[in-house]
Image: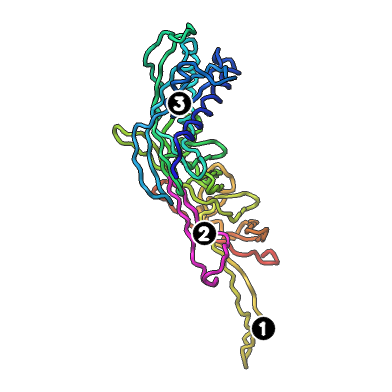
Amino acid sequence: MYLTEKVISNKIQEALNTISNTLYDSEVIDTKVVFKITPNVADYDTMVDMEYVVGDSINYTPVLLKSVASSMQDDFISGTYTEGYICEILAFDKDKDSIEKIFNQYAYDESLNDSFTIDDWTILKANTSRIRFNQTYSATDGSNEDRISYSFDFTWQFVLGGIMDGASSFKINTKAIDVIGVSFVSDKLSIANVAFGDNVTPIGATGFTLSLTIPAQNLTDNKALYSDLLSKQYNKQYTIEWVISNFHTQSYDMLLRSGTVNYQRDQLISYTLTFEEALPRTSITVDSINLPILDFNYSRSNEIISNALPVEIKSAGTQSFYEMDIKFGYLPTIAKSQDLLKAILNCDYMQTTYEIILTLAGGVSKTYNVMLKSGSYTFQQTAELIYDCKFVEVDTNGV
């Protein structure tokens, strides 16, 4: 049920030989090293003594894989176990520089890819040591080729039927980001007129919140996200791709809503970014200018037009009008924002006609011609200026 040492040997052998070929083809190393990894001591001794089978003339670099520690949980359905290994390498002395470059690249690749799968097992790679020089051996097999001994050790955690954190990866705006902590919340709201059990999802009926803890690293994309955290700008949209092995892949369009910096003495500095789903927004323009709207309320009233006679009061018809209450955030760089605030300060009510275009989701839009009926303004603790405008419909006769 558990993975055999032969399977593990083949996996490492494939990775090392791929790196060796790549570095040789790119002329990073001078000699093409061919590794042969085995957990069998007799096979290893044969390669050390350069005793090859008939027709096999390759000067392999033999590697012996040995298990040195084990912690096993006997759960064959969703079990995990951890195994420690040591690899003993007997290379040719002339290949010394090439060997060290190959293993430096191997250690680097291991640090980038935290997990892989073999059959139904997920293997988490952890604690791979650097290659260690042991000693040099003079040739004793008549080849006059001295040997050099190296070793390295590693620990793998094996997971069957489960997915560990190392199997997930993130990209933010197509850039891979190292993440050390994740919190994802899917918040589904109750809709009054939808029966229980119905599989419907109106826009806005669900909310997604994703918090990512990212280590502070001297990398361009990492530093850019940290700058966004410190910025006072808002509503910046990100595309976040979350891949969990072959279990699930999801892409979200989200907005950065908040963030914290995590700092503790003698600990890794990190920061946490909290994103939320980027839902469609209602667009409101005033005289074709898109202003920041903090709150919007629309109401329509109908009034009976009565005609008072000496004998009776008779209903002669109705008239309809509407009012809009819109709360704006003041932007001194936009002339239209200044004009509305000046109208409130100078009490210039019912003087100017404004065209307001309200654009809803699904391509529904409406144009209104209004005048400013009244207004007010407030200062918040953050020193932001907010003003509230009450608009009324312009009479059809323009009066």
Do the residues under discs 3 and 1 have CB atoms within 8 angstroms? no
Q: Which residue is mark 3?
A: 107
The segment highlighted magenta reads 182-211
Query: 36 above or below 11?
Result: above
Q: Which residue is mark 1?
A: 316
Residue 146 is covered by the magenta coloring: no
Q: Earlier in the sequence, mark 2 or mark 1?
A: 2
Say left or right for 383 vs 298. Answer: left
Q: Quadrant of the N terminus?
A: top left
- The residue at 51%/27% (across/down) is 13
Is residue 168 in sight in this rendering?
Answer: yes
* Residue 147 sits in quarter: top left
Q: Earlier in the sequence, mark 2 or mark 3?
A: 3
Q: Which of the two residues, 178 or 204, is positioned nearer the viewer here?
A: 178
Label 3: how many Cα within 10 Å (few below 14, some 14–19, many 20+): some
Nearer the observer, disc 2 or disc 1?
2
